[in-house]
């Protein structure tokens, strides 16, 4: 039994994060993350979550606007029969090394999303709201990224200047200041000719 509306609303997203890239090979996952393609990852999550919530007659949709609720939510889960909004998500991607080395590049955008989420929701009800953060950690890079900060050349490949553990600790601390109940999920490990990465996702409840 779920204790809060946030826990109930977050459960299908957390479960779907574990499987949303299963149909892609490692190279495809690497390329999506190397491009910084947050919308593509959001689409993968939308599809995987819908496969879980359809029996409840719920639906997850991208780029949704609802008058009096929110203007253009990255992801919105609603009840089909009633139209009631069950969850609102705003999503961002940040490379793991930037979490430590370049906070000024990403924290303003995160702050804006948290402000947007805090002002959203249906009048007279408590709509669960979440900040979804995609965080790829490129352990090794054999085909240059478009943005190579945070990596040093070692032989014929580049390596991250920070460990996965260091970046996870920093990301959790940063998100804890923005919301509550930060949930971290390891979405995928990818090992390909282009490089090796771990893709994490964080779901943070915003009050």
Image (spheres, rainbow, N blue to C red):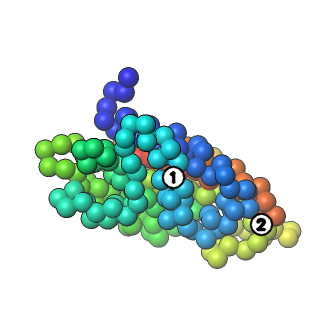
Task: Tell me residue 93's x, y (percent).
Answer: 51, 62
Q: Going from the N terminus, do you reach mark 2 or mark 1 first? A: 1
Q: Going 41% across and 60% down the picture, which residue do you hit?
A: 62
Q: Please identify the residue farthest to the top as the structure is shown.
A: 1
Q: Please identify the residue farthest to the front as the structure is shown.
A: 81
Mark 1 neighbour class, 10 Å CA radius: few under 14, some 14 to 19, many 20 or more = some
The reply, left or right, for residue 9 in relation to residue 123 is right
Compared with 150, 9 (above or below) is above
Task: Tell me residue 148's x, y (percent).
Answer: 66, 73
Q: Is disc 1 placed on a helix, strand or loop?
A: helix
| Residue matched to label 2 | 194
Mark 2 neighbour class, 10 Å CA radius: few under 14, some 14 to 19, many 20 or more = some
The reply, left or right, for residue 205 in relation to residue 47 is left
Of tags 2 and 1, which is closer to the observer? 1
Task: Tell me residue 26's x, y (percent).
Answer: 73, 56
The reply, left or right, for residue 66 in relation to residue 54 is left
Count of numbered labels shown in the rendering:
2
Compared with 110, 182 (above or below) is above
Choose between 175 and 27: the one closer to the eye: 27
Task: Tell me residue 202's x, y (percent).
Answer: 49, 48
| Residue matched to label 1 | 47
Q: Is disc 2 placed on a helix, strand or loop?
A: loop
């Amino acid at each position: 039994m779920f204790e809060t509306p946030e826990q109930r609303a977050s459960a299908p997203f957390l479960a779907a994060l574990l499987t949303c890239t299963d149909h892609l090979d490692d190279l495809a996952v690497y390329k999506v993350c190397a491009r910084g393609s947050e919308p593509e990852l959001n689409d993968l999550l939308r599809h995987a979550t819908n496969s879980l919530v359809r029996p409840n007659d719920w639906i997850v949709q991208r780029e949704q606007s609802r008058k009096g609720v929110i203007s253009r939510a990255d992801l919105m889960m609603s009840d089909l029969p009633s139209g009631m909004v069950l969850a609102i998500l705003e999503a961002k991607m940040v490379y793991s090394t930037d979490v430590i080395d370049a906070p000024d590049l990403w924290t303003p955008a995160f702050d804006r999303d948290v402000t947007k989420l805090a002002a959203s929701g249906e009048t007279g009800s408590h709509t669960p709201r979440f900040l979804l953060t995609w965080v790829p950690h490129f352990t090794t890079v054999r085909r240059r990224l478009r943005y190579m900060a945070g990596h040093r050349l070692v032989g014929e490949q580049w390596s991250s200047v920070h460990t996965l553990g260091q970046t996870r600790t920093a990301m959790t601390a940063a998100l804890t200041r923005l919301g509550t109940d930060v949930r971290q999920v390891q979405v995928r490990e990818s090992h390909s000719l282009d490089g090796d990465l771990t893709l994490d996702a964080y779901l943070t409840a915003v009050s």
